[in-house]
Image (tube, rainbow, N blue to C red):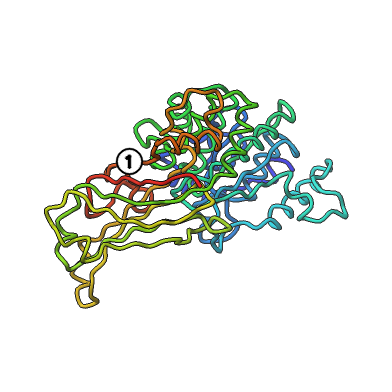
Amino acid sequence: MSTRNHRRAKLTDLLKTIYATPLNVHKNNLGIPLDLSYITTKLVVCSYPVTKYPKLMYRNSLEDLVAFLNLRHGPGNWKIYNFKVERGKSDYEDRDLEELLRSAVSDCSKKSYFSKNSTLAAEIDCVLNRVGWMDHSPPPFALLQEIIDDINIQLCRSDSCVAVLHCKMGKGRSGTICIAYMMKYMACPLSESRDLFMNARFKPGISRGVTILSQLRWLRYHEMFLYYEPDVRTEIMKQLANSKFKIHSVQLREPSSVLYSHHCVASIKLQLFNEVRDSVIDVATLETDAELLSNPDNKTITICFPLELDASDIRLEFGISARSQSLMSSFTALASYAHCWLNLYWETLKCSRENTSDYYSLSNLRCEQAAGQEFFFVMKWSELDGTGGTSNRGLKLFESLTLKWSLV
């Protein structure tokens, strides 16, 4: 496929250029307008490509993206990693990508990605890896490692190979993976990796790159993980996969006076990813009741909920609602929405005081627990994630929280 045959001037090109103004977009000489940034020579980040209007007017075109990758890097040398699990009418399907690849191979008479009799399900994996999760969230820790290991395999195939990462905007989810990859396979410190991503993806002063606090917490877990030698990391992942926990309580320090007004109720939800990771499921919901709020002079509210979990990646969500429907509209202005993700295994290790070489093992951690060591997680209200990936948490419900648990 020649560049001249592929590209004709389009009225939407200007709109796409304007839409990508805040981004540090790669200026290609092929005449293809794409929101696409080279973080390194082999690591590419872009916003998600589409196939239908109206989003095709201002989003990346899947056809344009495939044409660019084939012309710039060559068929068979690139692989797309799609972290956008939410699906829209304009989003591309696996079949769309396969048809473009077959068409490109037919045009340039080069070796196909697919044999004539191959099935899409059997061979699409060589050009596309759909490993998405909910927006404004970190991935499960085990999935984080799987993704960056797969990216490394792709890039090590040859010096010509590239990995193309996208979520929705090419910011939070793509940035988290990109930074984690550079930390693990380029021996780049966390702070330096964050700066590399920010400067390569965004124009100066526009964005700080990955800013969602739970995603940054995951990168600090990843940083802890990389302190260990590779053979130890393998054992740690086994320990993480086998870990089970019993949640004991959540303590709210210096609760807001609005909780004692008796007109509203604060709720705490403990949540896990659902099977496809496009949403969360509530495994426990607790509310502040009259007994807990009977003494407004108390500086803490402790809510107990003995609950056993066999997952280490959890989400705590905090909210407020009116006690009666008639008062619901009055509390619209008092809306409160805050949450955080944490990994109980890594937080358990952070509490450990053992100095043995294998202190990370569940058996040693249980022994430490039996000797009186408590496991807990403390976070200030200001350190929680807000709504829609912002710092907007609404009405402040407490100064800080303490979650306590034990190993099962």
User: Which residue does the numbered mark 1 point to in the structure image?
Assistant: 378
> Which residue, as the protein is rendered here, is positioned at the far right?
117
Q: Is residue 318 above or below residue 37?
A: below
| Residue 92 x/y as whole percent | 62, 56
Tell which residue pokes out farthest to the left in this image: 297
At 71% from the left and 28% from the top, the residue drawn is 156
Residue 242, quarter of picture? top right
Front-most of residues 354 and 146: 354
Q: Quadrant of residue 7?
A: top right
Query: Residue sitting at 70 percent across and 35 percent down?
Result: 154
Question: How many residues crowd around disc 1 within 10 Å: few (fewer than 14), some, or many (20 or more)?
Answer: few
Residue 373 higher or lower than 89, as above or below = above
Quadrant location of the N terminus?
Answer: top right
Q: Is residue 2 left or right of residue 38?
A: right
- Indicate whether 288 appears above or below 391: below
Residue 102 or 179: which is nearer the viewer?
179
Observer able to see residue 11: no
Question: In the displayed structure, does residue 261 sit left or right of residue 307?
Answer: left
